[in-house]
Amino acid sequence: MAVEKLSLSFEPDLAQRTREAAEATGRSLSAFVAEAVEQRLKLEAGRRLLEEWEHEHGAISDRERIKASSRWPD
């Protein structure tokens, strides 16, 4: 698998917490950060999809939100 090396900057506290979290999960720092970015990209894609849907069909009602939320585990 090909990889691209990136240089990232973090505030010191966030850098330390990230290192500790990666270590606690037994993953490398790179793998931990890559997984976090992948999750964020999925969330952003979902938000865009929801915005498109609402643009076509109108805002989702509170009733619909409650119904959808009840189907997802916490």
Image (spheres, rainbow, N blue to C red):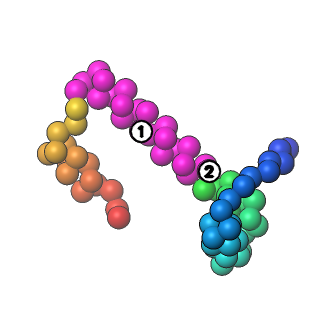
51 over 12 or under it: above or below: above
- Which element carries disc 2, helix, strand or loop? helix
Seen from the viewer's position, the closer of residues 65 and 8 is 8
Q: Residue at x 80, y 48 (%)?
A: 6
Residue at the farthest top position: 56
Identify the image quadrant of the C terminus.
Answer: bottom left
Q: Residues within 10 Å of mark 1 (few under 14, many from 20)?
A: few
Indicate yes or no whether the magenta region holds residue 21: no
Task: Give the residue type at disc 2.
Answer: Val
Mark found first going from the N terminus, 2 or 1: 2
Relative to 26, does residue 54 appear above or below in the rendering?
Answer: above
Neighbor class of circle 2 (other Cα within 10 Å; few <14, some 14-19, many 20+) is few
Q: Residue at x 54, y 49 (%)?
A: 40
Q: Which numbered marker is on residue 37?
A: 2
Q: Is residue 51 above or below residue 63?
A: above
Cα separation, mark 2 vs mark 1, equals 15 Å
Residue sitting at x 48%, y 45%: 43
User: Looking at the picture, how far across and down is residue 72, in whole percent?
Assistant: 33, 56
20 lies left or right of 54: right
Q: Main secondary structure of the magenta part?
A: helix
Q: Secondary structure at mark 1?
A: helix
Residue 70: quarter of image: bottom left
User: Residue 30 appears at what percent x and percent y?
Assistant: 75, 59
Q: Left or right: 41 with respect to 64?
A: right
Task: Determine which residue is flagged by label 1.
Answer: 47
x, y percentage for residue 29?
74, 65
Q: Which stretch did the figure color magenta? A: 37-58
